[in-house]
Amino acid sequence: MTFINFASREINCKIVYYGPGLCGKTTNIQWIHNQANPDKRGKLVSLATETDRTLFFDFLPLDMGTIRGFKVRFHLYTVPGQVFYDASRKLILRGCDGVIFVADSQKPRMEANIESIANLATNLKDNGFDIRTIPYVLQLNKRDMPSAVAAEEMERLLRFRGEPMLEAVANAGTGVIETLKACARQILVELQKG
Amino acid sequence: MAKLDLVMFEEEFKLLQEITARLAKDAQAKVVFLVDKNGQQIAAAGDVKSIDATSLASLTAGNVAATDGLAKLIGEKEFSLLFHEGEKDNLHISLVGRRGILVVIFDQNSSLALVRLRVKKTGKELQEIFDRVENRAQTEAATGGQFESPFSEITDEDIDKLFGD
């Protein structure tokens, strides 16, 4: 749910990083946090366990610049990927404007990717959204891993609506910004449509 | 897509800001924030600079959402009030209508009783404004009417420029 404030001339949008456990959602926003100009980013908030697994969410506010005199600000959230945190995942999708699905390219994680997309569809539906129409990007992460499945094969398994699909190595920053831009662009195009 | 954007115009924003400022004074609070349930800050008053408002808004919304989930688990509709007591500062969180959350931070210069009393009164005023914003959004969604969106005229070039492409 976009928040347009005419008084402060600000527009706030919410993007959620979704995907199975350990696929690199937090790594994506950590990299964005490390690279972003300190004037443009807020504090990275991580609600994690002692072993650094996401417990509830990570949050990063990011100023993208100005468009038609309005300051455009994106709020980036990650969900906890582990299966048993489903109730939390559902809460975090509340009011989102776009979703980035981070898929783990490693062969043994393909089923987890497929299950996570199905879970995303259900949780979006429960929040009143449709996975087929909401701004959505598919990121194939961990492309550097030896057991990485071919991109074409992942596309066949995971891509279902002609969404932008980007290859990434999040811990090296490859494809991270491009993925964010692809999602942000779709959200702005939605706003353009009104 | 089932979403109703929250569109706040100058007049409503001013009113919310005024009410929030009055509450901060009347409740003798350090800071008062009004945030929405999705974690966006709407208005603030008091010693705002002492706190990272964006993180506060997001964490408050997360807290309220989790508490909401707990309420449903035990068969309650919602818990309309959360109170966190610290050594020096305390946090009073209450729901305003269906969309708003009022956060009052106070220390020994005030008391829980005073804060609760003031929040109760203020909550009603705030709710009226939220209802107005919500009704307008619903009417526009139902009639297909659109307010003059500043984004309906953005071009692909504007978007490219934003991303430095």
Image (spheres, rainbow, N blue to C red):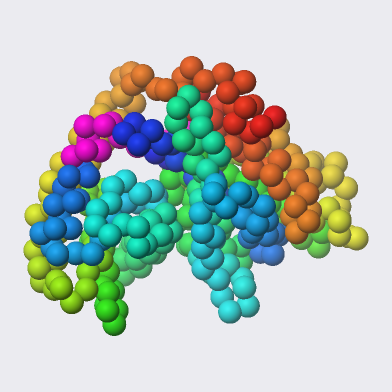
Coordinates of residue B149 in the picture (x, y in percent): 40, 22
Q: Residue furthest bottom?
A: B87
The magenta stretch spans residue B77: no
Is B93 on the left or on the right of B110, as rendered?
right
**Residue drawn at 58 percent across, 44 percent down:** A99
In depth, the one of B72 and B88 nearer the eye is B88
The magenta stretch spans residue B6: yes
Is A158 on the left or on the right of B1, as rendered?
right
B37 is higher (above) or lower (below) than A55: above
* Residue A50 seen in render: yes
Q: Residue furthest right?
A: A146
Coordinates of residue A97 in the picture (x, y in percent): 50, 40
Coordinates of residue A12 in the picture (x, y in percent): 45, 40
* Residue B60 seen in render: no
Is A170 on the left or on the right of B107, as rendered?
right
**Residue drawn at 63 percent across, 50 percent down:** A36
In depth, the one of A184 and A64 nearer the eye is A64
Quadrant placement of the C terminus of chain B: top right
B98 is higher (above) or lower (below) than B84: above
In depth, the one of A146 and B154 nearer the eye is B154
**Residue drawn at 27 percent across, 69 percent down:** B91
Q: Determine the image quadrant of residue B156.
A: top right
**Residue drawn at 31 percent across, 34 percent down:** A7
Q: How many numbered marks appear?
A: 0
In depth, the one of A168 and A66 nearer the eye is A66
Magenta residue span:
B1-15
Coordinates of residue B92 in the picture (x, y in percent): 24, 67
Q: Determine the image quadrant of residue A116.
A: bottom right
Q: Determine the image quadrant of residue B74.
A: bottom left
